[in-house]
Image (cartoon, rainbow, N blue to C red):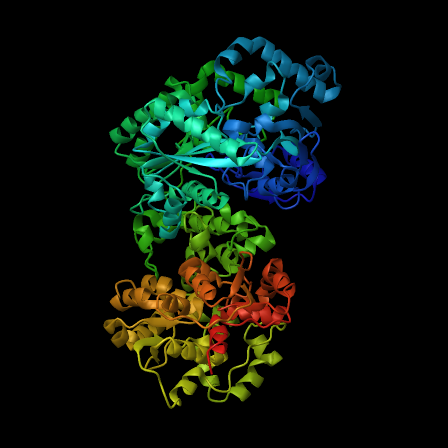
């Protein structure tokens, strides 16, 4: 049967959905919508079934009690929301995985999530007080972390029957359970049978059961008291093995965290992040431990850190060290660790790296031996991998460059994983130390627990779910670990002829689609530009991950069978704003804007009549603007009419920005004077030239004041962005090629090209080299084009004093491609007290927000953060937005008019 996704409206609806589906004999998986680990075991149903997604509505924090230090939450609550609610009380939830911004409590319970602080505060299971659940037969019951066995067994009906069966099960098997289960904190694999023994913690048993026993409706969780002060001690080592050898010494000092990173990941961080980390206190080394210690105040926390460092020195450890007390510097260093999850999915040379053996754990005192043995296995199989982990609990995360595309590579994969599992078992470890077993590691449970242990799992599953409908095939009856690896679609062998080159993916569109590994950062709803459409719809289809997976399915050809002509893929990409937020915010740099342009080009190839009307009206804006410049008043009357909007696919609610009565280039041509100095070429983009020439005039005044000779290209030019974003790539290639030919003399001379519109500047820096691979002019333009602020910040010019406060909305393409540091420095030099808007897209996004079918989403994106923030500003605060789309959305959604930075600086020049 096909997979059916059900979105319950509340807890009652959730319970009913599970009961109805299970009663019909359909396989059921309840998911929270966050990161899907362990081979996507939690979040998909092999062979079809019902997926119940709790993330959209069943997501309320029902109670926080500071006295008892507990919270009551629904399963769709995102961890960062719980942490924010608990923080005013000086409390937090103890398990804090790096995916906290999208990890739901229901998913964390299913996987028994851990995180950096679990070394001090325990796993999710350790922090459960009670669970309200529904069984596959519809029975609803409350399970406590500490229950009276006799009282539970005496309860009526199915509830009492369940408890009596569980107690008989543990009585028969107590010796085996005590010998093999609960041997160390990160023994996450399998069912946590030991929790049924002394405390009769049935809630703890369900944590880590991967949705196979019951569905969580509500959870009562323990909250921990935050330390009043924290310091971060960063230890540097020559390699990860040496760092692992010092773990037992550090553990004696009760650290709050002990996290590892190595140079393979740090070296791949953006230069500014890496430099900031060194400045913040990253000591010399090739591997590092981030050890956090707490105290009643900063001096006591620092004293605890110094005592730990002293014992390390006395033990003969070669560690270098820095003690970091400044919270901002600590945050910079923690970013090195939190970004590691995405960086590890690719090798430094761009080759793919995979999970599958990604989170094994051993008792911490044996971690060094595990890493040594693992190095031997990697060398034997010719493999390599980037690693990071929770060293305080003996857990290592790793992505390895397996070849999962060929039969020989799959054979090597199986051999390695089996041998690595043997190593872990020999050291008394767990094949999963955090993410769960799922399809990727379930088969290995037999190595850990033996045939009699697996028999216990099957018996327990029958007690809870006799019909085997809740996430079937996991833990109790695991499939072969290599059974469902699906990278054998037709695109794998014959490749695809694409317009873009994909240089970071070995020039392969299919490899680009494999970038997404399900990390799920695109599902966070604050603190990120990515992904604006998901932030308003909350639907997986409209997340970066959902779109990437849909494109992958298109290439695989099993589910989506009509390739580039697929209407499912077209509709899935439809609400992508092409903001490029995922290019920078996604840990693995998935670039849906480029993929959408590529798909759209092929989807409508040889079918121009099938294109949306807006592709002709908005996609060809540069050409229509040139015509309009000859009669702008007539053009404005025509463009603003209802008939024109309807024929052009433009939303009736939108005001079409008027064409200027005089273009910027015409004004520039009739100037009588020009300044002498270093020559720069000012790029007259379509928006500045035809719609906002006052910005071009202001930029000329500022640049000449700074001592530059400003020239314009000798012929009309265009970056091609409107054709790129509407997937008209053949036309875009011709347009960009002609523009580059016009710029050739300036490029050959090394003359800086200055862009005023961030989207056009980003197009030359990012899109043009991939669109015109092998064209040396495209490569030169990418390095020579500079933003207005970049040029001025690097010059000796002292800007005029502007002063005042400014609310700044960076353009999404600037955020993703260009960066904002230069603008920040230039504003500071001009005395502008700049405050950045909360991260997020304005919602207009070029043609997107003008299109009839996208108007509602465009407005919803704007109303999510930006527009309310602008309306709340005092009149004395200037609104700054260099992007034409951002200024237009602000003008049409608030009473304010946003300005370009060039205008502010020009206004302050001496007259």
Image quadrant of residue 77? Answer: top right
Q: Residue at x 44, y 48 (%)?
A: 553
Q: What is the residue that sits farthest to the front in this orientation? A: 299
Q: What is the residue that sits farthest to the left in this orientation? A: 748
Residue 76 appears anywhere in the view: no
Please state if 27 lies on the left or on the right of 500 as rendered.
right
Q: How many marks?
A: 0
The x, y position of residue 718, in whole percent, is 38, 74
The x, y position of residue 239, in whole percent, is 31, 32
Q: Residue at x 38, y 79 (%)?
A: 704
For this rendering, which residue is in front, 138 or 516? 516
Image position of 792 with respect to 553: above or below: below
Q: Residue at x 71, y 21 (%)?
A: 158
Residue 49 appears anywhere in the view: yes
Q: Residue at x 49, y 62 (%)?
A: 810
Image position of 552 with respect to 884: above or below: above
Image position of 204 with respect to 758: above or below: above
The x, y position of residue 332, in whole percent, is 44, 45
For this rendering, which residue is in front, 763 or 222? 222
Q: Point out the image quarter for the N terminus.
A: top right
For this rendering, which residue is in front, 693 or 472? 693
Please state if 785 lies on the left or on the right of 517 as rendered.
left
């Amino acid at each position: 049967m096909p997979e059916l996704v059900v979105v319950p409206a509340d807890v009652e609806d959730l319970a009913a959905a599970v009961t109805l589906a299970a009663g019909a004999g359909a396989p059921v998986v309840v998911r929270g919508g966050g990161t899907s680990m362990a081979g996507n075991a939690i979040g998909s149903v092999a062979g079809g079934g019902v997926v119940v997604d709790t993330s959209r509505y069943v997501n309320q924090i029902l109670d926080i009690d500071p006295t008892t230090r507990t919270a009551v939450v629904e399963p769709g609550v995102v961890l960062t929301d719980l942490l924010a609610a608990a923080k005013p009380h000086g409390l937090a939830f103890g398990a804090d995985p790096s995916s906290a911004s999208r990890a739901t409590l229901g998913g964390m319970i299913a996987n028994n999530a851990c995180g950096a602080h679990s070394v001090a505060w325990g796993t999710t299971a350790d922090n459960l007080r009670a669970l309200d659940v529904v069984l596959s037969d519809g029975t609803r019951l409350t399970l406590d972390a500490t229950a009276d066995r006799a009282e539970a067994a005496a309860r009526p009906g199915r509830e009492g029957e369940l408890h009596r069966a569980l107690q008989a099960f543990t009585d028969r098997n107590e010796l085996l359970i005590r010998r093999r289960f609960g041997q160390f904190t990160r023994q996450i694999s399998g069912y946590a049978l030991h929790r049924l023994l002394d405390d009769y913690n049935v809630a703890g048993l369900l944590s880590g059961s991967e949705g196979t026993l019951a569905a969580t409706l509500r959870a009562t969780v323990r909250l921990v008291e935050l330390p009043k002060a924290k310091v971060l001690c960063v230890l540097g080592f020559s390699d990860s093995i040496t760092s692992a050898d010092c773990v037992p010494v550090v553990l004696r000092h009760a650290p709050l965290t002990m996290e590892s990173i190595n140079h393979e990941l740090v070296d791949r961080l953006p230069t500014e992040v890496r430099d900031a980390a060194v400045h913040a206190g990253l000591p010399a080394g090739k591997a590092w431990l981030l050890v956090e210690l707490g105290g009643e105040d900063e001096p006591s926390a620092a004293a605890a850190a110094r005592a730990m460092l002293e014992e390390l020195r006395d033990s003969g450890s070669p560690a270098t060290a820095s003690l970091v007390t400044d919270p901002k510097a600590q945050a910079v260093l923690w970013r090195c660790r939190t970004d590691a999850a995405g960086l590890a999915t690719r090798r430094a040379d761009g080759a793919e790296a995979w999970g599958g053996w990604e989170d094994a754990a051993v008792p911490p005192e044996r971690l060094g031996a595990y890493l040594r043995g693992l190095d031997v296995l990697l060398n034997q199989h010719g493999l390599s991998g980037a690693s990071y982990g929770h060293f305080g609990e003996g857990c290592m995360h790793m992505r390895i460059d397996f070849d999962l595309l060929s039969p020989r590579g799959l054979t090597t994969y199986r051999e390695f994983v089996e041998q690595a599992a043997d190593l872990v078992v020999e050291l008394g470890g767990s094949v999963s130390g955090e993410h769960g077993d799922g399809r990727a590691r379930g088969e290995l449970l037999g190595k850990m627990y033996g045939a009699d242990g697996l028999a216990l799992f099957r018996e327990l599953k029958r007690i809870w779910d006799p019909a085997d409908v809740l996430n079937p095939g996991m833990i109790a009856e695991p499939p072969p670990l290599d059974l469902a690896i699906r990278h054998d679609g037709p695109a794998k062998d014959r490749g695809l002829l694409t317009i873009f080159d994909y240089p970071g993916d070995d020039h392969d569109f299919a490899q680009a689609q494999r970038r997404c590994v399900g990390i799920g950062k695109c599902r966070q709803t604050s603190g990120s530009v990515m992904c604006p459409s998901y932030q308003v719809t909350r639907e997986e289809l409209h997340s970066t991950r959902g779109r990437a997976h849909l494109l992958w399915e298109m290439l695989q050809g099993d589910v989506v069978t009509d390739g580039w002509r697929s209407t499912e893929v077209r509709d899935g990409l439809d609400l992508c704003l092409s903001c490029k937020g995922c290019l920078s915010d996604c840990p693995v740099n998935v670039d849906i804007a480029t993929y959408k342009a590529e798909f759209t080009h092929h989807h409508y190839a040889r079918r121009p009549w099938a294109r949306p009307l807006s592709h002709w009206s908005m996609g060809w804006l540069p050409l229509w603007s040139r015509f309009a410049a000859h009669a702008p008043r007539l053009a404005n009357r025509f463009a603003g009419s209802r008939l024109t909007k309807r024929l052009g696919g433009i939303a009736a609610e939108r005001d079409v920005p008027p064409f200027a009565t005089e273009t910027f280039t015409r004004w520039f041509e009739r100037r009588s004077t020009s300044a002498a100095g270093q020559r720069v070429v000012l790029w007259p983009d379509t928006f500045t030239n035809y719609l906002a020439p006052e910005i071009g005039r202001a930029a000329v005044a500022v640049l000449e004041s700074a001592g530059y000779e400003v020239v314009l290209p000798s012929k009309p030019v265009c970056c091609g962005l409107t054709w790129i974003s509407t997937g008209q790539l053949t036309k875009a290639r011709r347009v960009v090629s002609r523009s580059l030919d016009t710029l050739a003399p300036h490029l050959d001379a090394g003359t800086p090209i200055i862009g005023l519109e961030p989207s056009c500047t980003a197009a030359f820096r990012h899109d043009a080299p991939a669109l015109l691979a092998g064209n040396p002019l495209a490569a030169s333009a990418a390095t020579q084009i500079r933003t207005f602020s970049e040029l001025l910040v690097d010059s000796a010019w002292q800007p005029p004093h502007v002063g005042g406060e400014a609310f700044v909305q960076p353009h999404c393409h600037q955020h993703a491609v260009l960066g904002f540091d230069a603008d920040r420095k230039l504003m500071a030099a001009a005395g502008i007290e700049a405050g950045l808007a909360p991260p997020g897209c304005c919602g207009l996004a070029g043609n997107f927000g003008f299109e009839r079918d996208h108007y509602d989403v465009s407005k919803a994106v704007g109303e999510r953060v930006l527009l309310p923030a602008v309306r709340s500003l005092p009149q004395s605060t200037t609104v700054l937005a260099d992007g034409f789309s951002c200024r237009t959305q602000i003008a049409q959604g608030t009473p304010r008019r946003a300005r370009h930075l060039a205008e502010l600086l020009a206004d302050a020049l001496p007259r």
